Image: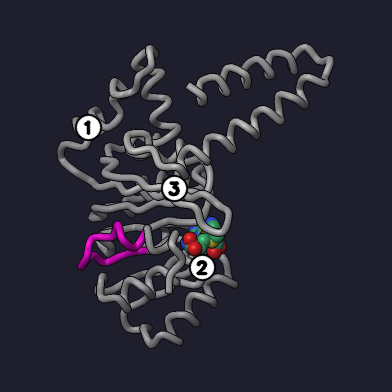
């Protein structure tokens, strides 16, 4: 049985798509997608030897070597354009994820890919910005808590009208805040436009924890005599106020 986190990612994959899971570790996700009949074939990419071997073993133990190809390499470099319809990247920081996506895009590795399912552990805003900048339509997002950790999953599609659709998705006028349009957009990039439209207790919990973290930092900065500490403290205080609003 998959973890709830991986299950949520799997649920977003369009049935029948060929999938490439980048940074696959034990290849649990592609193995599930093949065994459940959701995907006909899959590629698992891994940069590091240990996880690469774990993925190979997982594929062999499941008797899936014919349909699950395990490849070693950095990010999307393991793909040839047109080999996959869906790409999943999960369990790494948003910054690394955007770097992998950008390098892959530059190298034409996302050609033919119509769907991305991304689960950044932190730095979700960087991933949303990358998707926005590259014209991917953010179709849905979800947030869940498992084993004391909070995860966000982003589902994006390539579409003709991505720009218009994102315009609507990132239109923050539904929020009861008298902020400028660009401030509202910044907020949606940070907190998730779909998540903010249907806030769940987990979303509230995530941002409460963020406020607590910022308050701890403010407290530490308050004990410092350095002038730049005072500047930073007031920036963090403003940020806390924004999140609370
Ligand atoms: N995707 C799995 C999941 O969500 O359960 C595994 C996540 S694991 C924490 C992150 C994996 O990404 C590690 O196995 C690591 O070796 C791999 N990784 C890190 N940087 C990578 C890169 N540039 N290209 C491919 N794999 C990478």
Q: Which residue is mark 2?
A: 25
Q: Which residue is mark 1?
A: 163
Residue at the (69%, 13%) spot, across then down: 231
Residue at the (40%, 68%) spot, across then down: 29
Quarter-of-image position of residue 188: top left
Q: Which residue is mark 3?
A: 152
Q: Is residue 60 above or below residue 48?
A: below
Q: Position of residue 56 (x, y in %)?
A: 48, 79
Q: Which one is in front, 25 or 100? A: 25
Q: Is residue 139 above or below residue 220?
A: below
Quarter-of-image position of residue 192: top left
* N-terminal-most mark, 1 or 3: 3
- Distance of mark 1 from mark 3, alpha carbons? 23 Å
* Left or right position of 212 against 131: right
Q: Are marks 1 and 3 in contact (CB under 8 Å)?
A: no
Name the mark nearer the viewer: 1 or 3: 3
Name the mark nearer the viewer: 2 or 3: 3
* N-terminal-most mark, 2 or 1: 2
Q: Is label 3's Cβ within 8 Å of ligand 1?
A: no
Residue at the (57%, 66%) spot, across then down: 48
Q: Is label 2's Cβ within 8 Å of ligand 1?
A: yes
Q: Magenta span has 11? A: yes
* Left or right position of 49 against 217: left
Q: Which one is in front, 110 or 214? A: 214
* Residue count near mark 1 (Cα–Cα under 10 Å), binned few <14, some 14–19, many ≥20: some
Q: Position of residue 184 (x, y in %)?
A: 38, 21
């Amino acid at each position: 049985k998959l973890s709830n986190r991986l299950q949520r990612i799997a649920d977003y994959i369009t049935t029948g798509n060929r999938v490439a899971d980048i940074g696959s570790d034990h290849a649990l996700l592609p193995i599930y997608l093949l065994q459940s009949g959701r995907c006909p074939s899959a590629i698992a990419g891994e940069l590091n030897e240990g996880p690469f071997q774990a993925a190979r073993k997982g594929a062999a133990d499941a008797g899936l070597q014919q349909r699950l190809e395990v490849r070693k390499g950095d990010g999307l470099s393991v793909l040839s354009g047109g080999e996959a319809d869906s790409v999943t990247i999960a369990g790494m920081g948003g910054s690394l994820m955007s770097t992998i996506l950008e390098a892959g895009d530059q190298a034409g590795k996302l050609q033919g890919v119509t769907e991305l399912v991304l689960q950044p552990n932190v730095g979700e805003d960087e991933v949303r910005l990358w998707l926005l900048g590259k014209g991917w339509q953010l179709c849905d997002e979800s947030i869940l808590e498992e084993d004391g950790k909070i995860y966000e999953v982003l589902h994006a599609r390539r579409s003709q009208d991505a720009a218009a659709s994102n315009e609507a998705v990132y239109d923050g006028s539904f929020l009861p805040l008298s902020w400028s349009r660009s401030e509202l957009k910044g907020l949606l990039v940070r907190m998730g436009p779909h998540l903010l439209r249907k806030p769940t207790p987990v979303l509230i919990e995530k941002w409460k924890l963020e406020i607590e973290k910022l308050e701890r930092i403010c407290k530490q900065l308050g004990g410092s005599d350095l002038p730049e500490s005072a500047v930073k403290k007031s920036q963090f205080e403003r940020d806390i106020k924004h999140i609370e609003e």
